[in-house]
Amino acid sequence: MPSWDLNILVKPRKCYNVKAIIKGFLSREKNIIPKYHVVLVKMKFQQMGSKSSSNFVYIIMDEGTKEAAVIDPSGSVKDIVAILKAWGATLKYVVHTHGHGDHTGGTQGLIAQCGGKLVAHPSSPMHPALPVRNNERLYLGKTDLLFLNTPGHSYDSICMAAGKYLFTGDTLFIDECGYAEQVGGDSALMWDSIFNRILKLDDDYIICPGHDLKASAKKTDTLGNQRKSNYALKPRTKDEFRAFMMSA
Ligand SMILES: [Fe+2]
């Protein structure tokens, strides 16, 4: 079932979930409110498992404009299109977290049926219409999409933050991280991506991985929880992390 998500974005870049506000999170920082422009954003979110693989596909939509993005369109294009139609969505972006075939297989069919522009890192083998580099943004209505370049699993790996969600592709899974020792991978780059980019983000972000590795019963989890439970995120030096990845 799709979930509804109401966030308050405090520009230039702060996102508060309504539940967190109810818990008094915002009240502790209310002194910042007068300085910023506050925008109410309602976003729809759907995680789709694949029948034939462990891949996850994600669909998000800005409720104000009905503009949608599909992240890593593997699996059944028919099912993705059915959800977009049910939501009355206009597909604006197809986002690749990286160019591996198990994340990109439905791209051509989806764009042929629904339109939308391909978004990926400039080094993607899929030649994106909208190449995105580290810290660049795109917009679905008032929902801003922040891209982080997170090489390691592959050179073109990116993560995308949208509201409270963080789509991590094959860089970070629930209670696991992606492989970095295959062709095109680099565990030293992976260390930088995890420890100097992803783990610098707020604990409230909900990690939306590219695969269900079944290392946990959870399909998503907060970054705060993952800091505690994910053995790949234990503090390690770069050399220690490389040795860890080689031994995994
Ligand atoms: Fe991959």
Image: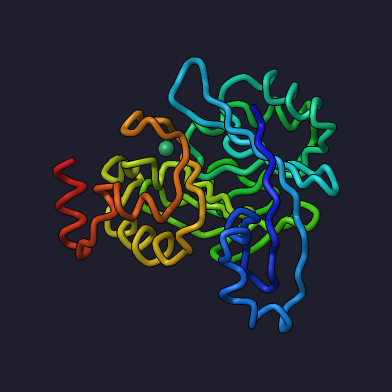
User: How far across and down, in percent of the image, does residue 103 sit?
Assistant: 52, 33
Which residue is found at the position 50% from the left and 42% from the top?
A: 208
Near-viewer residue (183 or 199): 199
Q: Position of residue 153 (x, y in %)?
A: 37, 46
Quadrant in which the C terminus is drawn = top left
Q: Quadrant of residue 200?
A: bottom left
- Image quarter for ligand 1 equals top left
Vertical position of residue 32 compared to residue 49: above or below: below
Q: Relative to 179, is 9 on the left or the right?
A: right
Q: Is residue 56 above or below residue 141?
A: above
State the image coordinates of residue 129 (x, y, percent, origin top left).
Answer: 70, 48
* Marker count (numbered): 0
User: What quarter of the picture does the N terminus occupy?
Assistant: top right
Q: Is residue 64 left or right of residue 12?
A: right
The one nearer the camera, 237 or 162, is 162
Residue 34: horizontal and vertical position, in percent? 73, 82
Left or right of 198? Residue 229 is left
Q: Quadrant of residue 163?
A: bottom right
Q: Is residue 18 above or below residue 98?
A: below
Foreground: 212 or 180? 212
- Residue sitting at x 58%, y 41%: 126
Residue at position x 42%, y 42% from top? Answer: 170
Q: Residue at x 43, y 25 (%)?
A: 54
Outermost top residue: 52
